[in-house]
Every structure is written in structure tokens, then in C-alpha cells.
Image: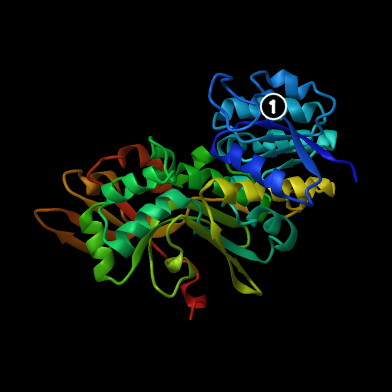
């Protein structure tokens, strides 16, 4: 079995974790040959001879037979991954932003050149959700993939609901622990979850949906009144991503805060953990749980992909070859909670049915039925600091008893 010689791009928190797990793994039969970084002047914890600031030094090295890419620049990651694949070098990537925007092109290159791109680490940290969906779940029987896909936002909401922290203090704690960046918007606005959902859907149903076509709403404007309302109802608020089959011919997908009841698996997914529920026609629900943030959990997932390459594994994208694949639709009705103060929400949104309304000096809210297409069309008008939206689940309620 040929030894894997790795060219590593990126040596931040995750890159350093990869170096450690590869070094410690007795069965990986792999070694890191060279590491490409942005700056050679930065102090390093390992021998400086490992490092280069030239991508060509790695991509043109005939000794290197696997590229591992864990940089945070999506454009640079795309350039590296595409160049490597076109050279016939297999790649392991953890960059969900890059993958979510370029998967169709990268899948085409893989198929034409018979080269592998693996990216289990791009979705849900240590949980092997991609490979499981790829290998074990037929899209005819698959009804839903739903869960908490972002460890940072989940840590914040866990501190709020389980420890009575304020949102601001919980966010500061997440940043101090390295779960959230100094600019946390990628996580708390839902984009991290969105990009993971795009990737998951390719492997769940065999269909790619561009990120801009998917309604996404985060937790940055959550207010004490929303938290109080949830507590009064005996629920928690979680940032949830989901892809749902709504008929034999159609599926939908979105990312939103959700009121989660105690009988749901994801209710007890706390701190930086992720949890994914896979629902099927014949097997009801299956639940996957694991750490979704941090250096070593992500590095362990990268190692799993490295080990898979040791056995010549690649995704086959079988579901893309199915004659009948469901089409994406936003022509569905959701039940939502909308809290607001000064924004004229009734002028912006046209509810199909209003189920409950409340008005006070501090804030107002409305609960009603609304088309997902309406939310998507009006999303630029739903960015006010005085607004907060949350989904109230309606799918598969009759199956959860």
C-alpha cells in the first residue's frame, strides 16, 4: 500500500490539528511533506523547513500524492483545489464556502479525470454525515435531513437557554474559546449552516441548489423577549438547517432559528456539538451527534478522509444518475414567529393566515402561515435590528408520536 505524501495548505487551528493527528496515527501510513502558508515570518511550533509560501512548490512536487486544503480564503481554496484536480492529484478539503459555490464544476472535473475530492470535514465537524448519506440512504426513501450544523451558534444559544447568560456574554465566551471568530457573522447569520446544507443535499438527494436560492436567517437579532417567549412555551431556540421532501416530486430547504420541543433529538444538543436527524420512509429517524467545532474534531474528520484515500475511496455521486430526482421548490407554507418593534412587518409580509398576535410597549409578535417564496423574496427587507424570525415546525408532526 503506497504511502500518502501530503501537501497541506493552511496551518491555522485546523491545520495544526491535522499535523498532530497525522503524526499520532499509527495506521494512516501518511506523512506531511510540505505546508503552504500565507506568511513565512509567523512563529511556528514545528520545524520551519516544512513551510513554503508558494502553492506551486506543492502542486508541482511529484512526490506529493494528496492535497489537504484547510485555508479560510474561499477564492484561494477554489484555485488550489481546481488546479490539483486538473493535475490528477486527489484532494481533501474542509472549505464549505468554496464547495457550496463550486461543487457542480468540481464534480464534473472529478468524473472526467477520475480523480477524488473528499470533504466530510466540511459539514458537521467530527460527524461523518456526507459519507453516510452517500453510501447508505437512497433518495427515494429519504424524507428529511435536519439538524444543528454550526457549533458556534449552538454554543451561544446553549449558554442563553441552559445557563441564563445574555446573548452578548455568550457570544463573547464563544469568541474567547475559539468557537466563534472576532467577526462572528458567518456563523450567527446562518451562512456556515447554509453552505453545509447545500453540500449535504447533493449527497442526500443528488441535487445541487445554489446558496442564493435558499432562505437563510440567523440569530444575531435574538432578544430577551424571544427567549422569554420560548421559555414560557417550554421550548428552546436552535439554529436549524433542513432539507425536506414535501412530495414525491419536490423538496425544500432553508436555515432558520426554530422553536424546538423537548421530545426532539436536537433539543438536547448543546454547547459546540452538532446533531443531525435523518428521516426515512421505512426507518423513521436516525440521529448522529458529535463535536462540530474545534481543532481536533475537524482534524479527525480530515484524517478519516485521508484514510479513505489510502483505500482509494472516492464519492460516486450515484444519486445524480437517478432518472427521477425531486426538484427544489419554495412554493410551500411555513408557520413562523415574527417579533418586531418599529418595522411595519404587516406591510412587508403577506401572511396566508395569522394564528396569533401580541402587542406591547416593548415589542410585538405575530405567528402565522407564510409562503417560503415570500420570505425569500423579501429577505432584504427582513434585516432590521428590531426583527427576529423563528420557524415553528409543521413537517412530519404526525410521525413523532
For residue 261, side relative to residue 192 (left or right):
left
Q: Quadrant of residue 233?
A: bottom left
**What residue is rendered at 80% in x and 45% in y?**
309
Which residue is nearer to you in this view: 108 or 39? 39
| Residue situated in front as seen by the camera: 297 or 210 | 297
Residue 291 lies, in percent from the top left, at 53, 56
Q: How is the image coloured?
A: rainbow
Q: On screen, 345 above or below 266?
A: above
Q: Is residue 44 above or below residue 226?
A: above
Quadrant of residue 379 in the image?
A: top left
Decide: few, some or many residues near mark 1? Use Cα within 10 Å; few <14, some 14-19, many ≥20.
few
State the residue lying farthest toward the left.
Answer: 361
Of 45 and 207, the residue lying toward us: 45
- The residue shown at (37%, 43%) is 176
Is 31 left or right of 101, judged from the image as shown? right
Task: Find residue 229 and report its image quarter.
Answer: bottom left
Nearest the viewer among 360 and 171 is 171
Residue 166 spot, x, y in % from top left? 25, 53
375 w.r.t. 34: above or below: below
**Residue displayed at 64% across by 29% down:** 78
User: Is there any visible trace of residue 353 in the rendered image?
Assistant: no
Do we see residue 231 in this rendering? yes
Rendered location of residue 24, percent (x, y):
70, 48
Q: Position of residue 274 (x, y in %)?
A: 51, 57
Instruction: Classify mark 1: helix, strand or loop.
Output: helix
Q: Residue furthest right?
A: 1
Residue found at x 61% / y 31%: 10
Q: Taking 3 as reference, is 400 left or right?
A: left
Count of labels shown? 1
What residue is shown with label 1? 50
Amino acid at each position: 500500500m503506497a504511502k500518502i505524501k501530503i501537501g497541506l495548505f493552511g496551518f491555522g487551528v485546523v491545520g495544526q490539528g491535522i499535523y498532530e493527528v497525522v503524526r499520532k496515527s499509527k495506521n494512516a501510513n501518511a506523512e506531511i511533506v510540505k505546508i503552504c502558508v500565507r506568511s513565512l515570518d509567523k512563529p511556528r511550533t514545528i520545524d520551519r523547513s516544512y513551510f513554503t509560501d508558494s502553492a506551486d512548490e506543492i502542486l508541482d512536487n511529484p512526490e506529493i500524492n494528496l492535497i489537504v486544503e484547510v485555508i479560510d480564503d474561499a477564492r484561494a481554496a477554489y484555485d488550489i483545489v481546481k488546479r490539483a484536480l486538473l493535475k490528477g492529484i486527489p484532494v481533501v478539503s474542509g472549505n464549505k464556502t468554496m464547495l457550496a459555490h463550486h461543487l457542480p464544476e468540481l464534480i464534473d472535473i472529478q468524473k472526467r479525470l477520475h480523480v477524488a475530492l473528499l470533504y466530510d470535514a466540511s459539514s458537521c465537524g467530527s460527524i461523518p454525515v456526507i459519507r453516510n448519506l452517500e453510501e447508505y440512504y437512497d433518495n427515494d426513501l429519504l424524507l428529511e435531513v435536519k439538524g444543528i450544523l454550526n457549533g458556534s451558534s449552538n454554543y451561544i444559544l446553549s449558554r442563553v437557554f441552559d445557563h441564563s447568560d445574555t446573548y452578548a456574554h455568550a457570544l463573547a465566551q464563544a469568541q474567547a474559546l475559539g468557537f466563534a471568530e472576532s467577526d462572528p457573522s458567518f456563523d450567527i447569520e446562518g451562512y456556515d449552516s447554509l453552505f453545509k446544507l447545500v453540500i449535504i443535499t447533493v449527497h442526500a438527494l443528488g441535487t445541487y441548489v445554489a446558496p442564493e436560492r435558499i432562505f437563510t436567517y440567523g440569530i444575531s437579532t435574538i432578544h430577551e423577549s424571544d427567549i422569554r417567549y420560548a421559555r414560557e412555551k417550554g421550548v428552546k431556540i436552535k439554529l436549524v438547517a433542513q432539507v425536506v421532501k414535501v412530495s414525491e416530486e419536490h423538496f425544500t430547504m432553508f436555515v432558520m432559528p426554530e422553536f424546538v420541543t423537548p421530545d426532539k433529538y436536537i433539543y438536547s444538543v448543546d454547547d459546540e456539538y452538532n446533531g443531525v436527524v435523518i428521516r426515512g420512509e421505512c426507518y423513521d429517524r436516525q440521529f448522529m451527534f458529535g463535536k462540530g467545532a474545534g481543532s481536533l474534531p475537524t482534524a479527525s474528520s480530515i484524517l478519516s478522509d485521508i484514510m479513505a484515500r489510502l483505500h482509494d475511496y472516492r464519492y460516486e455521486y450515484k444519486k445524480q444518475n437517478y432518472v427521477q430526482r425531486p426538484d427544489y421548490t419554495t412554493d410551500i407554507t411555513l408557520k413562523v414567529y415574527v417579533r418586531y418593534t418599529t418595522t411595519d412587518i404587516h406591510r412587508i409580509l403577506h401572511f396566508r393566515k395569522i394564528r396569533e398576535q401580541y402587542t406591547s410597549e416593548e415589542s410585538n409578535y405575530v405567528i402565522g402561515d407564510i409562503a417560503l417564496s415570500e420570505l425569500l423574496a423579501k429577505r432584504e427587507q427582513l434585516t432590521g435590528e428590531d426583527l427576529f424570525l423563528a420557524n415553528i415546525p409543521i413537517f412530519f408532526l404526525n410521525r413523532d408520536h
